[in-house]
Image (cartoon, grey):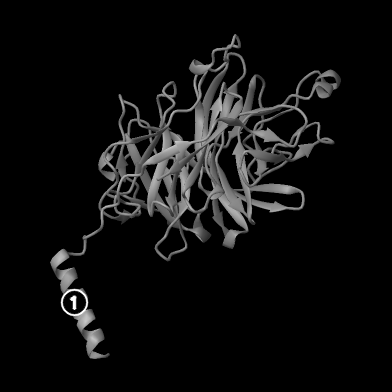
Amino acid sequence: MSLVMQAVYMFTLAQLVVAGPLAFCVIPAPVIKSSTPIQNMTSNFPWAIRRDGGGGGTISGKHIVNFADTTTSNPDALRKLGFLPFASNSIAIAGEDGMHVTDTGVGKNVGVKQMWPFATSKSPINGETREENKPNHRYAIWPNTNIVSACGGACGYTVSNVLDITILPYAENFLYSTLAKITIGNEGPTVKREAVALWYKYEMNYGDFGLARARDGSNDIFLFAAPEKSFGMKVARVCETEIADKTKYLFWNGKTWSKNPPGALDSTANIFQYNEGGFGPGTGDIFWNKHLNTWISVFNDEMSAYSMFRLMYSTTGNILGPWSEKPIDAYKPFSCGDNKSNLLCSVPYNYGTHAYPDIDTTGKTLLLSWTYDGQQTMFSTIEFE
């Protein structure tokens, strides 16, 4: 080692001793510069598509978006079948702007194809057949989470909730979450449920809020959870190759990564705290933003009637924080309260709020979406300074 290099090395060590191992540069708060006019999602289908949910990701270089209940407003099908084609879920391939999508059809494209399979006697999954519909009940798989790229970019993983729904009177009963692996072939997206039941209602639903790849050189995937009354965000991690095995997960407990998950209401295990009027984080996403050079989380809170997009960010660039103490109001979306027409909303509040960081990988702009009136996906793009 040259004398110059030795001097640099010793100076660096001295700086570390003085500053300590926890020294860091505080990242400034993001500033939203502007937002674009609202646009509605459009499909390659000639009819209107009514759906909710959301959450996207990139697989094999293509951006895809998950949806929950999907109805194809095909008048010919209504005349012939007596009902409009319906699917419990769907997946669309988005164009470069993320707002114009290509749907996969079923039955000579009379309706949008259901993508997530159910575990029934006709289509068992890993020997499971528990999702048979019963009289006055139906099972639903409602994707509302992003998709994290995996398999070197050739696949993606995501988590969705499985529900038992009473038709009359209408009531939702959450059963468990399920882990899926998504690929794209010549016939469009294919969903394989790697774990029919990942987390049950008495467990913390890691991955329900979102998933992201670790940035520490490992092959790990982070899975995020925002339990009700936890007022913050919790995180687990697992190697990509073991993501379907819960026994391999490590959970952040506020001090270290542990094999044992923290309690749902243990706020010391949150990577960030969020409590606005007694409501915690609702739906949203966590991801690395290249432009801001840190992790950010964009979401609405559990008080759906107040549909503001909130933004929290890591002040150090570390997923574990510290994070910002107060949320930034990132964007106020159009809602039914803003509708001045005579058309009344069937669902008076927005939900299914999501961000799509893959649309602009520079991080300078960020595409946002939300479900309006329970059936329409709206978009706007914000720009950071």
The residue positioned 53% from the left and 24% from the top of the image is 172
- Residue 218, image x and y in percent? 43, 64
Q: Which residue is mark 1?
A: 11
- The secondary structure type at the circle numbered 1 is helix
Extreme residue in the top direction = 342
Question: Left or right of 170: which side holds 106?
Answer: right
Asked if one can make out residue 119 in the rendered structure from this viewpoint, the answer is no
In the displayed orientation, state which residue is furthest to the left.
Answer: 18
308 relative to 15, above or below: above
* Kind of residue sitting beneath label 1: Phe
The picture places residue 338, in percent across and down from the top left corner, at 50, 17
- The relative height of residue 242 versus residue 360 in the rendered view (above or below) is below
Q: Which residue appears at 78% of the width and 30% of the height?
A: 46
Answer with the quarter of the image where residue 372 lies.
top right
27 horizontally vs 202: left or right: left
Q: How many marks?
A: 1
- Nearest to the observer: residue 78 or residue 383: 383
Q: 310 or 69, which lies in front? A: 310
Q: Is residue 125 left or right of residue 56?
A: right
Crowd around label 1: few <14 · some 14–19 · many ≥20 (10 Å): few
- Tell me residue 284's x, y (percent): 46, 38
